[in-house]
């Protein structure tokens, strides 16, 4: 694999992660693809290697396991792969009142959305600092910019990702490393069904994962701190929401998540 153009992408078996893999491969970059489904990863590997004549390594891991990030890093180290681009895309949500939802489900969400992302970043960032080059793209959400009644933990995890990404970007800028938080709105992926969000209005106009991936990849290339895929959402979150009372924001946020 190429020493200076290899991207590791989590959640690569579908949705935004799969589209990010296709974009990177089309630019001639090698890949390490991570997800739970070995079959889907192998199919994507075969597609990209045949079409773009690149090298693809697949790693089937479940990031809800606290030791998964270390195993992933050990496998790439054993294969002498230098990851120059880390894309933390894996994540999931869940709908409902916090006290009625399974605590285990919420803790698993925190593990995947925050802890695994943090661990992978820590493992691969040290090598980037030593080489004085690297790019990190963390897939967050517009949910990061307000509390989310009916998705309380999910919104909180994405606030963590966005805050962590920006702080990290400042720390490593002197080492020629960029960190970007991609904050899309509703995206038409398996996320909706997995998070029990069928019937929530905002997903009726969800954007395609390919368009969101293009937005995020280009933002990463430019070294942007935070990237939105929708101008209207960006304006609302940056200029309207901060002017409203907290109670008003909470009521609006809940209305967005209520099922019709």
Image (spheres, rainbow, N blue to C red):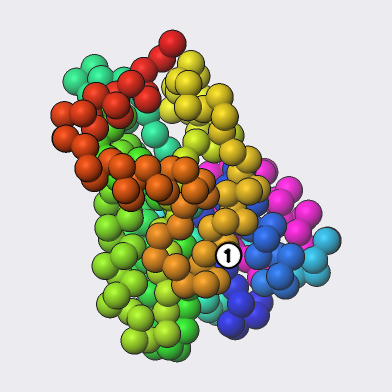
Seen at 49% across and 48% down, the residue is 231
Q: Picture coordinates of residue 2 (x, y %)?
A: 65, 80
Seen at 27% across and 52% down, the residue is 160
Residue position marked by numbered label 1 in the rendering? 218
Residue 27 visible from this viewpoint: yes
Magenta part mainly helix, strand or loop?
A: helix
The quarter of the rendered structure image containing the N terminus is bottom right
Q: In front: 212, or 91?
A: 212
The quarter of the displayed image where residue 128 is located: bottom left
Q: Picture coordinates of residue 164 (x, y %)?
A: 28, 61
Can you say whether 188 is above or below 210 in the image? above
Can you say whether 124 is above or below 192 in the image? below
Q: In front: 243, or 3?
A: 243
Can you say whether 166 is above or below 145 in the image? below
The quarter of the rendered structure image containing the C terminus is top left
Span highlighted in magenta in the image: 30-50
């Amino acid at each position: 694999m190429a020493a200076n153009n290899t991207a590791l992408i989590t959640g690569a078996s579908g949705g935004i992660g799969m589209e990010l893999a296709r974009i990177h491969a089309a630019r001639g970059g090698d890949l390490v693809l991570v997800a739970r489904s070995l079959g889907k990863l192998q199919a994507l590997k075969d597609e990209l290697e045949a079409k773009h004549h690149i090298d693809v390594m697949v790693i089937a891991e479940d990031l809800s396991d606290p030791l998964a990030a270390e195993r992933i890093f050990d496998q790439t180290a054993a294969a002498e792969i230098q990851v120059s681009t880390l894309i933390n895309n894996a994540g999931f949500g869940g709908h409902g009142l916090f006290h009625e939802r399974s605590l285990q489900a919420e803790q698993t969400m925190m593990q995947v959305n925050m802890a695994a992302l943090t661990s992978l970043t820590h493992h691969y960032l040290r090598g980037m600092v030593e080489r004085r080059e690297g790019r990190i793209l963390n897939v967050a959400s517009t949910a990061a910019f307000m509390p989310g009644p009916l998705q309380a933990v999910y919104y909180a995890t994405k606030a963590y990702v966005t805050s962590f990404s920006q702080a990290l970007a400042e720390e490593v800028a002197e080492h020629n490393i960029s960190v970007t938080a991609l904050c899309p709105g509703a995206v038409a992926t398996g996320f909706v069904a997995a998070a029990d969000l069928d019937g929530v209005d905002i997903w009726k106009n969800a954007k395609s994962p390919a368009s969101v991936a293009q937005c995020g990849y280009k933002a990463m290339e430019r070294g942007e701190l935070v990237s939105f895929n929708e101008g209207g959402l960006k304006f609302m979150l940056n200029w309207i929401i901060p002017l409203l009372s907290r109670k008003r924001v909470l009521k609006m946020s809940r209305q967005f998540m209520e099922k019709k």
